[in-house]
Amino acid sequence: MNKLLQVLYSSCLLPSFLTCLPAAQAEEHSDTRPFFTIEALLGGSTLAEVEFEDGDTDSIRAGSGVYLALGVAHLMFDEQIDVGIRAGYLFDLVTAKNDAGDETVLSFTRKPVDLFSHVWLDRHCLGGGITMHFDPKFTSRETSDNADYENALGYYAEYLYHFVGADSALGIKYLSIDYKDKRTAEISHGGAWGITFNQLF
């Protein structure tokens, strides 16, 4: 009887176990996920300054702005490492209005493309990458103080805390990049610190 049970066990359960191996390995999955990023950055050289009627001032800085981006991250090694790419729009805008209703509008825009990688340690994430900023442009609607900059290559590093249930991450970021004026060859430093939020889909 015991021998019969052993035969049944070997002939039935062992093949079932072997069949389950690929599924178990698949749980240590490597998948590709789209995500959305929003960041608020502050820093860099002052490009222009505007003064309000009450005497307060505000400025456009080469590292400051709001960054909106979409990307794709490839998670691998049981979600311990990711690599990916994202692209978006980084802009800073200052608007001032005098008593007569005349507006002064200053803006600095660029179109970043980022290549990145991170290491995930439980809920903590460390990483960064290189970033290419295309078509950096400073614009003043009321004056001729406009400037076009060469495409700029920089790098960034960041720490993220992963909210597992929400598939989102919140953290801090440091960006290092310089912009070269096409006309004057003047360098504006765009180094900045910021807060970054990422949402996986």
Image (cartoon, grey):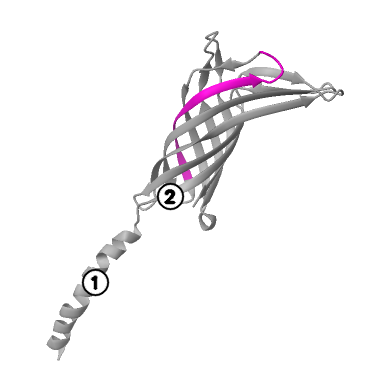
The dominant secondary structure in magenta is: strand
Mark 2 residue crowding within 10 angstroms, few (<14) / some (14–19) / many (20+): few
What amino acid type should be assigned to the residue bearing mark 2? Arg
Q: Is residue 155 left or right of residue 21?
A: right
Task: Give whichever of 61, 28 is nearer the camera.
Answer: 61
Give the residue displayed 55% in from the left and 24% down from the top: 191
- The mark found on residue 33 in the picture is 2
Residue 64, given in percent of the width and then of the height, sits at 61, 28
Residue 79, given in percent of the width and then of the height, sits at 39, 51
The answer to whether 167 is drawn above or below residue 10 in the figure is above
Q: Which residues are magenta?
A: 125-144
Task: Give whichever of 15, 121 is nearer the camera.
Answer: 15
Q: Is residue 113 left or right of residue 64?
A: left
Residue 140, given in percent of the width and then of the height, sits at 67, 19
Callout 1: SS: helix
- The mark found on residue 17 in the picture is 1
Task: Give whichever of 145, 177 is nearer the camera.
Answer: 145
Real-space CA distance between mark 1 and mark 2, rounded to the nearest whole angstrom: 30 Å
